[in-house]
Amino acid sequence: APRRHGVRRARPGRTADVKRLWRAEGAALGLIALIVVVLSFSGGSTLVKASHTPGITVAFWRMVLCSGIWAVILRISEGRWLTLGDIRAAFVPGMLFGTNIAFFFTGVTRTSIATAEFTGALSPMLVIPLGALIFKERVHLRALSFGAISVVGLALVLFGAPSAGEFSWTGEAWIIAANVLWAAYLLTSRSLRRGRSVAAIMAGIMPIATIVTLPLGLFVFPGSLGQVTWRSVVFIVVLAALTGTIAHGLMVFAQHSVPIGVISMLQLSQPVLAVTWSLLFLGARVRPVQVLGMALVMVGLVVMTLLTQRASAQPGYTDSQPNGELGGTPG
C-alpha cells in the first residue's frame, strides 16, 4: 500500500471487512448472551420450588442480596453510590416489582410450574391495552386479537391439570395477581428506563422491593422469613446471582447487537423451557391436553409478537410493549 510520511494507508476494503467481522462477532456474542438470559429466567421457578422454602422467604432474602450486589455494581460501573434521586424515581416501580416477586414466588410454590409460567406469559395481553389507554398509543387490533388463541390455550392448561397434581386455584390466584402487578410495573418503569443504566435502575428498585416485601413476610406469612435452611441459602444465592444479576446484565449486552424482534421471540420460549426443567428435575406431570393448550398459548403469542414488531416498523407507530432488559414474564 502507498505510504505518506512513513505511515501505511489503510485499504478501504480491508477496513470494511474488519468492521463486518466485528459486527458479526458482536451479534454472535449478543445471541449467546441472550440464550443464557432465557435459560436463566426459565429456570427461576424451578429453583424456587426446589428450595423447599416458602416463596415469600426466597423472594425477600434474594432481594436483600440483590440490593447489595447492584449497589456494588453501580459503584464500580459509574463510580457512585445510590442517591435520593435514584430512590425517588424508582419508588413506585420498586413497590410493584417487590410485590410482584413476592406474589409470583408464593404462587409458584402453591401450584404447578406449567400453570404459573403460562399464565405469566400472557402479560402482553394486559400491557398492550393498558399502554394504549394510559399513553394514548395506537393498538394493533389484529395482533391483539390473536391473544384470544393464547387465552383458549391457557384455559386448557388450567382446566386440564391432573386432579391429583400440584395445581391449585389458590396458587393460580397468586400468579394472576403477580401478572397484574408485573404489567403495572412495566408501564410505570417506562420513564425510569430513559437515560439510566440498568445498574442505576436495579440499584434503586431492589431496596424498595425488599422493604415492601418485609411486611408481607412479617404479617401475612408470620414466621416465614426465619424459615431459612442451608439448602434454601444455596438456592437463594443462585437465584440472586443468576436471575437477579447476571441475566439483567447480559440482556443489556445483547440489546447492543441483537434486534429487538429476536429478543422478543426468544423470550417467548421461557415458559416452555420452565416446564421442561420442572419435568426433568422436579418430576412434574403434564397431560396431553395441557400440551395442546401450551402450544396454543405459544402460537397466539408468536403471531401477536410478529404482527406487533411489523407494525412498530411503520412510521408513526409506537409500541406499548416494553421490550428489553426489564421485560419478560413475571418474576
Image (cartoon, grey):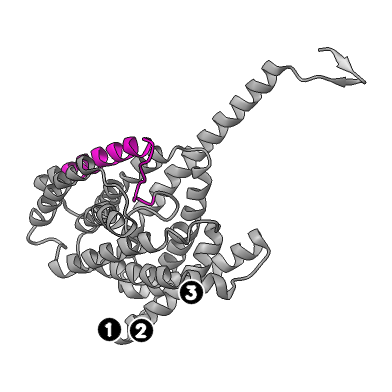
| Image x and y of residue 215, in percent | 35, 84
**171 vs 83, nearest the viewer:** 83
Write down the residue under mark 3: 207
Taking the image as shown, residue 305 lies to the left or right of residue 150, namely: right
Circle nearer the N terminus (2, 1)? 2
Write down the residue under mark 2: 215
**282 vs 108, nearest the viewer:** 108
Residue flagged by tag 2: what amino acid is it? Answer: Pro
| Image x and y of residue 223, in percent | 32, 86
| Image x and y of residue 53, in percent | 32, 72
Residue 210 falls in image quadrant: bottom left
Crowd tier of the residue under label 2, counting other residues whose Cα lies within 10 Å: few below 14, some 14–19, many 20 or above? few
As helix, strand or loop, the secondary structure at mark 2 comes to helix
Task: Tell whether position 313 is magenta.
Answer: yes
Residue 119 falls in image quadrant: bottom left
Q: Residue 239 carries which label?
A: none
Q: Where 110 sits versus 41, above or below?
A: below
Write down the residue under mark 1: 220
CB contact under 8 Å: marks 2 and 1: yes
Q: Main secondary structure of the magenta part?
A: helix
**50 vs 102, nearest the viewer:** 102
| Image x and y of residue 257, in percent | 52, 38
Q: Which quadrant: the C terminus? A: bottom left
**What segment is highlighted magenta in the picture?**
295-322
Label 3, label 2: how far apart the Cα atoms are: 14 Å
Taking the image as shown, residue 30 lies to the left or right of residue 309, namely: right
State the residue at coordinates (21%, 68%). Answer: 110
As helix, strand or loop, the secondary structure at mark 1 comes to helix
